[in-house]
């Protein structure tokens, strides 16, 4: 189901021509409207007219999250304030929140890219979209809502929380498409089981899950427990919210809506643009946004890009599953790793539940990592030897896979806090100065 064949299946040459035309417009817009960009361009001795090809963008300076924080709240809009009709503010997972201001046209763009995203999962006007992303300042709820409305699907704006009620509503209203974070999808399965309902019997067919990192093993877990296809969606408040990229049913990466957002993958250390397939930080330039236009915004998210046309018929490039945020990379005794790599292993452990936290501490000047993981309910918590065996097994598996010895602590079922939105995976107890 392709929402907008004209743009989603464009041949690369036409797409690049369109991107270049739009890139020139956006460079002019930010230069003329924001002193911030004017100064930044001038410091690099650049002018918007220096963009003659897409490659010319590489000469331009990056925009960072800290730049946006300084502009809080109204400082970075690229449309007059009277044209702004909506604000969204990031959840602030990694510090002071950032703001996005949308004009009416921006809201239409958002609806369009979200309609494409939902269509990637086969959503049509016959579907009932159970939207459990949080409504409010978080972009997940309203972004999904606008897309579902544009398709003409039946939207249930349930937001997060009151999970039992969610399940009853799913049954009564025959919800077919579930939109929420992957961790909340798992929690829905867990609560359904507690209610004596087999989650596979719920009418759900597909999940459009995102807003946090999740591993392939987590996908399999969700798919088998809920009996659905679980597809990945990516976005961020700074750019628009959800709807920057979406996985199609082929499940080999997320199609990035390149006619609206221009991607680059860079080496986070040197800033150099990397080749297709190489892993690095995703950098995005908005091509059509009015209220908040950004040039070379460093997302902090680590992935790679693939420009090959997809079996689904779309020609839009695909980004791989987000490995994590550059900020979330842990360096434990010289080994670099992302929480998602640990998750991938933990979820395959039969004796444990897919609920975990990573506790980071500093002992004698060294960083120590301990995984806290819930045991399965069928394991009795007083069988000390059994618990020790399982802990040792998990340690071994992590050591084999990642070459790193870490602590493992099993905790009782339901002791790790469940999240209605983004799960908190890392508890940093290091007292860094
Ligand atoms: P915050 O940075 O406060 O969490 P947002 O709510 O805007 O703000 O979240 C955007 C961020 O969420 C992205 O930059 C990315 O790190 C993460 N994210 C969003 N979608 C995904 C996804 N599908 N996979 C992994 N991470 C994601
Ligand atoms: Zn595809």
Image: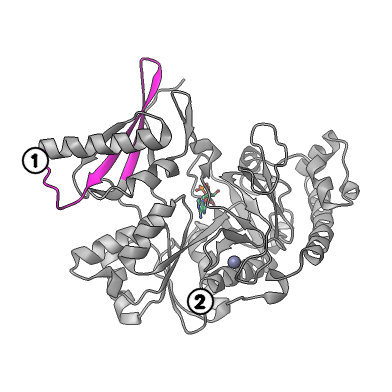
Q: Give the number of callouts.
A: 2
The colour scheme used here is: one colour
Q: Mark 1 points at which residue?
A: 382
Q: Which of 413 and 95 is in front in this view?
A: 413
Q: Horizontally, is 80 left or right of 415 in the view?
A: right
Looking at the image, residue 384 lies above or below residue 102: above
Q: Name the residue under label 2.
A: 123
- Residue 243 makes an appearance in the image: no
Q: Horizontally, is 293 left or right of 408 in the view?
A: right
> Where in the figure is residue 91, as x and y percent of width and height?
49, 49
> Where in the figure is residue 67, as x and y percent of width and height?
66, 39
Q: Quadrant of residue 189?
A: bottom left
> Where in the figure is residue 125, as x and y percent of width and height?
51, 83
> Where in the figure is residue 226, as x and y percent of width and height?
33, 67
Q: Which of 11 and 362 is in front in this view?
A: 11
Label 1 neighbour load within 10 Å: few <14, some 14-19, many 20+: few
Q: Which of 62 and 96 is in front in this view?
A: 62
Looking at the image, residue 314 lies above or below residue 336: below
Question: Which residue corresponds to the image point at 33% horizontal and 38% vertical from the top-left?
Answer: 397
Mark on residue 183? none
Q: Assess whether mark 1 and mark 2 are in contact (beta carbons under 8 angstroms).
A: no
Badge 2 element: loop
Q: Horizontally, is 147 left or right of 381 in the view?
A: right
Name the residue furthest top: 364
Query: Which residues fall within the magenta stretch?
Result: 356-383
Name the residue furthest bottom: 126
Question: Which residue corresponds to the image point at 43% horizontal and 51% vertical from the top-left?
Answer: 215
Badge 1 element: loop
Looking at the image, residue 124 lies above or below residue 82: below
Q: In which quarter of the image is residue 287?
A: bottom right
Question: Which residue corresponds to the image point at 28% horizontal and 69% vertical from the top-left?
Answer: 199
């Amino acid at each position: 189901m392709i929402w907008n064949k004209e743009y989603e299946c464009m041949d690369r040459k036409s797409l690049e021509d369109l991107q270049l035309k739009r890139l020139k417009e956006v460079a002019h817009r930010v230069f003329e409207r924001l002193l911030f960009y004017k100064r930044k361009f001038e410091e690099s001795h650049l002018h918007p007219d220096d963009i003659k090809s897409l490659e010319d963008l590489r000469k331009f300076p990056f925009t960072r999250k800290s730049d946006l924080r300084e502009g809080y709240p109204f400082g970075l809009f690229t449309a007059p304030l009277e044209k702004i009709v909506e604000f969204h503010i990031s959840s602030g997972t990694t510090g002071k929140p950032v703001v996005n201001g949308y004009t009416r046209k921006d809201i239409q763009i958002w609806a369009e890219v979200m309609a494409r995203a939902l269509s990637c999962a086969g959503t049509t006007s016959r579907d009932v979209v159970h939207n459990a992303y949080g409504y409010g300042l978080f972009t997940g709820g309203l972004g999904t809502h606008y897309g579902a409305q544009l398709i003409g699907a039946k939207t249930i704006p349930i937001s997060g929380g009151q999970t039992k009620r969610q399940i009853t509503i799913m049954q009564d209203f025959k919800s077919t498409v579930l939109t929420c974070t992957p961790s909340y999808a798992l929690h829905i399965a867990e609560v359904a089981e507690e209610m004596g309902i087999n989650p596979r019997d719920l009418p759900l067919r597909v999940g459009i899950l995102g807003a946090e990192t999740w591993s392939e093993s987590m996908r399999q877990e969700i798919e088998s427990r809920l009996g659905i296809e679980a597809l990945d969606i990516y976005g961020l408040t700074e750019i628009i919210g959800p709807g920057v990229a979406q996985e199609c049913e082929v499940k080999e990466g997320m199609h990035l809506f390149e006619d609206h957002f221009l991607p680059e993958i860079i080496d986070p250390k040197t800033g150099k643009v990397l080749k297709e397939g190489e892993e690095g930080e995703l950098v995005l330039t908005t091509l059509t946004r009015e209220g908040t236009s950004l040039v070379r915004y460093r997302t902090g998210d680590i992935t790679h890009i693939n420009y090959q046309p997809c079996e689904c018929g779309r020609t839009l490039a695909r980004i791989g599953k987000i490995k994590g945020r550059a900020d979330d990379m842990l360096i434990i005794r010289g080994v670099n790793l992302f929480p998602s790599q640990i998750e991938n292993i933990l979820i395959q452990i039969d004796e444990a539940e897919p609920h975990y936290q990573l506790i980071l501490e500093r002992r004698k000047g060294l960083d120590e990592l301990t995984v806290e993981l819930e045991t399965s309910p069928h394991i009795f918590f007083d069988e000390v030897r059994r618990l020790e065996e399982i802990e040792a097994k998990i340690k071994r598996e992590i050591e084999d896979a990642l070459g790193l010895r870490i602590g493992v602590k099993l905790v009782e079922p339901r002791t790790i806090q469940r999240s209605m939105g983004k799960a908190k995976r890392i508890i940093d107890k290091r007292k860094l100065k």
